Amino acid sequence: RTWRKLHLGVNEATGEIVAETLTGNSVDEASQVEPLLEQIDDEVETLGGDGGYDKHKVFEALADPPQEDPIQPLIALRKDAKIQQHGHGKAPPLARDQILRAIRKKGRKQWKHQSGYHRRSLAETQRFRYKQIIGDKLRARGLANQQVESRLGCAILNRMTHLGRPESYKVEKGN
């Protein structure tokens, strides 16, 4: 027996799952960025991810995506991250280096707040919804059938999302 990883691409504005892949446990998150991006028809402005996406191949894929414009990365870098291309070169600055410079200048907490990094939690919320509504176990036995099962689960969640989402708003606490 083994476990599977469900990688999701979520539209922040609609809450809809726009891309998904199901892989074995030995596949890293960073390797799924390109397959996820290939599934998305609309323009992608930003891609948020945790430290598992802090790989050069991810930043390269975002700089040269299937769409016309580059995608802005909102990726929390590893604590031991190093600058790859120093500022005195003639080449344009790398997105990863710009994030690292911002983290060093403002601090990690302030960078997360100012960059909107917290928005990536919407994908985590969708994964939680999937596990709560569809279940955290796959019923099919083979990987190909499990991939179809997870695609159907995402389609079911999207259908539920289209039926209506609650309106959320911040409530200020009175004195």
Image: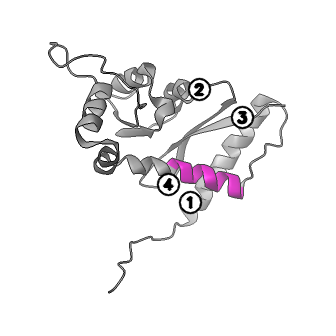
Q: Which residue does the numbered mark 2 point to in the structure image?
A: 28
Q: Which mark is residue 15?
A: 4
In the image, residue 172 sits, relative to residue 99, either above or below, namely below
Residue 175 placement (x, y as % from top left): 32, 87
Task: Give the magenta-colored segment's residue range.
Answer: 123-133
In terms of depth relative to the viewer, which is nearer, 98 or 135?
98
CB-based contact (under 8 Å), mark 1 and mark 4: yes
The answer to which of marks 1 and 4 sits earlier in the sequence is: 4
Residue 127: within the magenta? yes
What secondary structure prevails in the magenta region? Answer: helix
Q: Secondary structure at mark 3?
A: strand
Q: Residue at x 75, y 34 (%)?
A: 3
Q: Residue 157 falls in which quadrant of the image?
A: bottom right
Q: Residue at x 66, y 52 (%)?
A: 130
Q: Which residue does the numbered mark 1 point to in the structure image?
A: 161
Q: Nearer the viewer, mark 3 or mark 4?
A: 3
Image side of residue 136 versus residue 44, left or right = right
**Where is the N terminus found, in terms of image quarters?**
top right
Q: Which residue does the numbered mark 3 point to in the structure image?
A: 4
- Label 4 environment density (alpha carbons within 10 Å; few <14, some 14–19, many ≥20): some
Task: Kindly identify the amino acid type of the residue bearing the numbered disc 1.
Answer: Thr
In terms of depth relative to the viewer, which is nearer, 132 or 13?
132
Q: Is residue 65 visible in this depiction of the protein? A: no
Q: CA distance from mark 3 to mark 2?
A: 11 Å
Q: Residue 41 falls in which quadrant of the image?
A: top left
The answer to which of marks 2 and 4 sits earlier in the sequence is: 4
The answer to which of marks 1 and 3 sits earlier in the sequence is: 3
